[in-house]
Image (cartoon, rainbow, N blue to C red):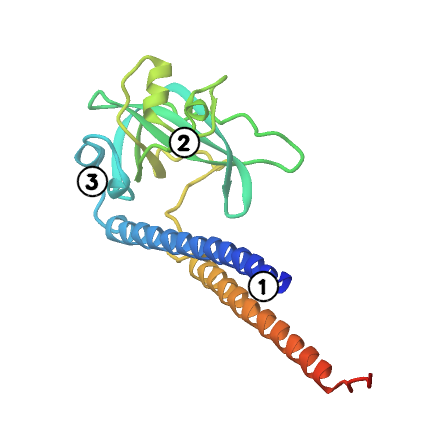
Amino acid sequence: MSRQVKRWIAMGVFAAILATVFVMLGQWQLRRLDERRETNATVEAHRDLPVAPYGDVMTGPVDDDDQWFRVSATGTYTGDQFQVRYRSLDGAYGSEAVAVLETTEGDLLLVNRGFLVRQPGYPDGALPAPPPGEVTVTGFVRRNDRGDEAAMTPHENQIRLISSDALGAALGEELVNGYIALLESTPAETDVLRPLAAPALDEGPHLSYALQWFAFTLIGVVGMVVLVRADLRDRRKERDASAREPVEAS
């Protein structure tokens, strides 16, 4: 086997590996696009329905299909509050305030009161106290965050992921599964906290990213063909040049 053929084989193997990786990345982006479309469909189907009592929706483990219903609850904040760090909203960085509401039905319900903007050059600030006395809250149903258990376990009342199961275990209480992302409160919440809105109903950059990865695959394959053809052309020119050289007389 000539060195040229070995070179082609090595180039072909490398190109095949790259093409496989690029195709897998493109397919992953298409799966992300499908997930985004499913989420958008759920938001559209649920967010404009009439507000329902939380007990009509949050009847068990809250999953993806249970999210984005608007529900209401009336009760009193217990004073237990947690700061969810490393959050962002509309390009700003900060934290979120999650408090426990004891409802008039006797349940303990997590309420994400809103987003606290972090001032440039300063750490996350202290969370404002919840409204005193009886309150009525309206918000979106959200499922528990998924991820590292350590991020859900409070340390000095700070967490990185919201989980009613983990917070209930830390408090020694049973909480309603999931939580409410606050939209309105009566009496009103402090202006320091910004309400959390429903996600934007766009499809994100996933389709364009997928097309880019598939384009890279095509470029790689075409580039491989061009290189091989160039090598063949150069070899043919060398053979032709050798054939035209005059034979020396003996």
Q: Amino acid at mark 2?
A: Gly
Indicate left or right for 82 with 163 as reference.
Answer: right
Residue behind mark 2: 147
| Image coordinates for residue 79, horizontal then vertical, percent | 39, 18
Percent x, y for residue 213? 49, 60
Which residue is depicted at the point 24% across and 43% down? 65
User: Where on the picture, by quarter, is residue 131?
Assistant: top left
- Give above or below for 248 relative to 183: below
* Disc sitting over residue 52 in the figure: 3
Is residue 133 visible in the rendered structure shown here?
A: no
Toward the viewer: 104 or 220?
Answer: 220
Which residue is denoted by mark 1 in the rendering? 5
Distance between mark 3 and mark 1 Cα atoms:
71 Å
Give the structural element (helix, strand or loop) at label 1. helix
Q: Quadrant of the N terminus?
A: bottom right
Q: In terms of secondary structure, where does tag 2 sit?
A: loop
**Residue at 30% over, 15% down:** 173
Gap between marks 2 and 1, in whole Å?
49 Å
Question: Is 174 left, or right, of 222 in this rendering?
Answer: left
> Of the residues shown, which amino acid type is indicated by label 1?
Val
- Please tell me the numbered disc located at residue 72: none
